[in-house]
């Protein structure tokens, strides 16, 4: 007896993921460029990549949901997001929250950081919405967290604050709605406030092989000292 082949599940079949990705498109279309040519160019690259993803009717591959210790703070992050300027994104993510796969992305994570950080990919090589053109996801930090200095080789990255305040390289405090651009190789460190968790959306643009295997590593102690961050 020959088993019947099932057709792959496409994005059009999963409204929850559709609406979440639409919120990314809205942010990168309507969000402020702050007068920055570099940020305007990055936002256009994100929009162009998303348009090609949508035109290709991407496959949706279910991943096993997984929590990490920091996801105990996710409910509070949604509370903050629901009364801030990023309420659309907060609510769209909340609707698919039971399906999210939270992970670390590093082979070795300091024990203290493992309690206070995790990320989930929602579109990219690891799915659940599959694409090799762009990676979209979220990173969650507990209060009083320092995410060590790191960089992404060949990957252009932006963060958008959804809930909670945070700083990059201790130069400013970024509120919900802020967009921060990190060019490839830029060394950066993230710190969060004392009282609330921080939820950031992110977009990665880069070569398909780098999006598939970004080789996430924290910077060496020597480089941290040299950069003074």
Image: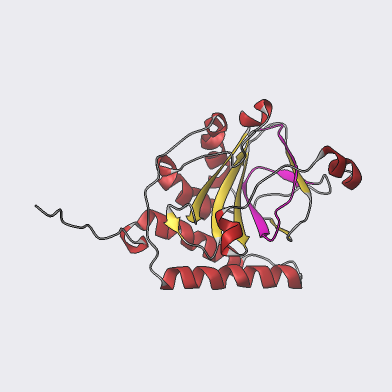
Residue 123 percent location from the top left of the image: 49, 56
Compare residues 30 and 134 and report the one nearer the observer. 134
Residue at left offset 56%, top offset 46%: 81
Q: How many marks?
A: 0
> Farthest residue in the top direction?
111
Residue at left offset 51%, top offset 63%: 132
Compare residues 223 and 56 and report the one nearer the observer. 223
Residue 185 percent location from the top left of the image: 76, 56
Whether residue 212 is visible, yes or no, is yes
Whether residue 83 is visible, yes or no, is no
Q: Quadrant of the C terminus?
A: top right
Residue 91 percent location from the top left of the image: 47, 49
When asked about the image quadrant of residue 73, the answer is: top right
Compare residues 141 and 111 and report the one nearer the observer. 111
* Left or right position of 139 against 132: right
> Farthest residue in the left direction?
1
Q: Is residue 148 above or below residue 213?
A: above
* Left or right position of 45 against 16: right
Q: Is residue 65 above or below residue 187?
A: above
Residue at left offset 89%, top offset 41%: 225
**Residue range (magenta):** 143-168
When asked about the image quadrant of residue 170, the answer is: top right
Q: Is residue 143 above or below residue 205?
A: above
Residue 201 percent location from the top left of the image: 59, 52
Compare residues 25 and 156 and report the one nearer the observer. 156
Residue at left offset 70%, top offset 49%: 175
- Is residue 150 within the magenta segment? yes
What secondary structure predominates along the stretch shown in magenta? strand
């Amino acid at each position: 007896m020959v088993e019947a082949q099932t057709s792959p599940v496409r994005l059009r079949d999963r409204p929850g993921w559709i609406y979440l990705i639409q919120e990314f498109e809205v942010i990168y279309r309507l969000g402020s460029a702050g007068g920055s040519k570099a940020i305007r160019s990055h936002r256009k690259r994100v929009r162009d990549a998303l348009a090609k993803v949508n035109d290709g009717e991407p496959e949706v591959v279910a991943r096993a949901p997984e929590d990490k210790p920091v996801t105990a703070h996710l409910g509070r992050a949604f509370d903050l997001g629901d009364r801030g300027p990023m309420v659309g994104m907060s609510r769209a993510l909340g609707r698919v929250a039971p399906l999210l796969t939270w992970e670390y992305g590093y082979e070795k994570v300091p024990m203290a950081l493992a309690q206070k950080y995790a990320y989930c990919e929602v579109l990219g090589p690891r799915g659940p919405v599959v694409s090799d053109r762009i990676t979209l996801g979220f990173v969650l930090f507990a209060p009083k967290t320092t995410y060590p200095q790191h960089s992404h080789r060949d990957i252009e990255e932006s963060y958008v604050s959804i809930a909670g305040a945070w700083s990059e390289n201790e130069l400013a405090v970024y509120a919900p709605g802020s967009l921060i651009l990190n060019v490839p190789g830029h060394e950066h460190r993230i710190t969060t406030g004392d009282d609330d968790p921080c939820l950031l959306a992110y977009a990665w643009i880069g070569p398909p092989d780098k999006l598939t295997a970004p080789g996430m590593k924290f910077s060496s102690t020597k480089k941290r000292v040299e950069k003074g961050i």
